[in-house]
Amino acid sequence: MILDGKALSKKILEEIKIEVQKLDKKPHLAVILVGDDTASRIYVNNKKKTALNIGINSTVIELPEDTKEEVLIEHIKKLNNDDDITGILVQMPLPKHINKDNVVCAIDPKKDVDCFTPENVGKLALGMKPYFYPVTPQGILIMLDYYGIQIEGRHVVVIGRSNIVGKPMVQMLLQRNATVTICHSQTKNLDDIIKTADIIISAVGKKIVRCKMVKYKSVLVDVGISRDANGKLTGDLNFSDFKDINEILDFVEAFSPVPGGVGPMTIASLMLNTLLFEHTGILRRIAKSGLE
Ligand code: NAP
């Protein structure tokens, strides 16, 4: 089975649009971009475009590379106090002279749609309900749930221990009663650990998972984004030992492609967070209706 994040995300965004139309007060996402990083600019523009397409207001605040930390924090405080702004997102990475932790701590946890603040991350770790769940792990779980992938009781190997993907993914999987192993660059015998996984979630940015080596009928979720020798977008999963897509589909229970898997789900998940109410109703409706 292919985990088609592109189609599922499209459906979620359509449903959000319908819900937003019913709201008197539209959600308003503020995104702060500091500096000139090309990839960050593309991500920010995508978020703004997606929000506007579904009726969510969006403001991008662009600040120059040499912006002082205090100035950035002043902008955040203004957004915290602005009743019209319902979500705040500071695009990472920030320039080196800015302390990321100070910036993250300045965001009002009730507007922290990325789940970066210590209050939200702490609540997640304690098994309490944060104001928002982290977008990429939430998007992955929505996708696995939609495709009926069982999580409870299974051994999930998460590769990568970043604050935005690996660590919160582990917390959310534990809450779903998975048995979780987390790996990183210093992990010994990664291939042996991978072989024991029922589900692999790889968030590295290098072709690290030789899929012929994984357990038969495991689920492979590819978060990684990199470019191959020809400049083509690619993920962490290496399928080069397989003859064709049919051989892959015979071997795995499911896998998510890059592009078209986790990436679009991350955007849909961010937009769900930007809504001002519980979004379980939307997901239940989609589970019933399917993607058509
Ligand atoms: P990151 O900060 O880029 O860190 C990469 C992680 O991979 C680190 O934990 C690192 O270990 C680990 N790693 C590096 N080499 C390794 C190796 N040889 N074996 C095992 N682990 C290794 O992580 P990130 O921000 O989560 O991003 C990871 C990838 O996911 C990137 O390609 C990024 O573009 C992509 N991403 C995609 C989405 C999406 O929506 N599709 C969202 C977020 C990120 P150490 O901690 O030991 O350094």
Image: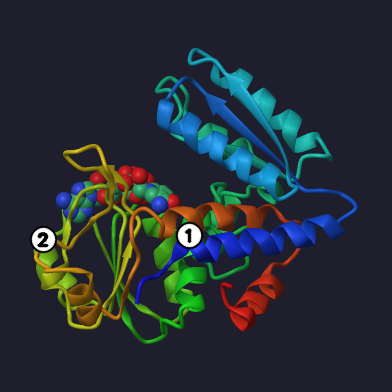
Give the image quarter of residue 227: top left
Which residue is located at x 43 percent, y 19 percent?
97
Left-right relation of 208 to 1: left
Question: In the image, what residue occupies the spot 42% across and 26% down?
Answer: 38
Provide the residue designation for mark 1: 6
- Foreground mark, 1 or 2, reads 1
With respect to residue 69, does 219 lie above or below?
Answer: below
Query: Which quarter shows the C terminus?
Result: bottom right
Above-or-below relation of 278 to 196: above
Look at the image and tell me whether residue 130 can be seen. no
Q: Gap in Å between the C-alphas at discs 1 and 2?
A: 34 Å
Q: Return the mark for residue 188.
A: 2
User: In the current view of this chain or complex, which residue is farthest to the bottom?
Assistant: 153
Secondary structure at numbered mark 1: helix
Disc 1 vs disc 2: Cβ atoms closer than 8 Å? no
Q: Residues within 10 Å of mark 1 (few under 14, many from 20)?
A: some
Position of 204 relative to 30 (above/below): below
- Sooner in the amino-acid sequence: mark 1 or mark 2: 1
38 is higher (above) or lower (below) than 188? above
**Depth check: 109 or 23 in front?**
23
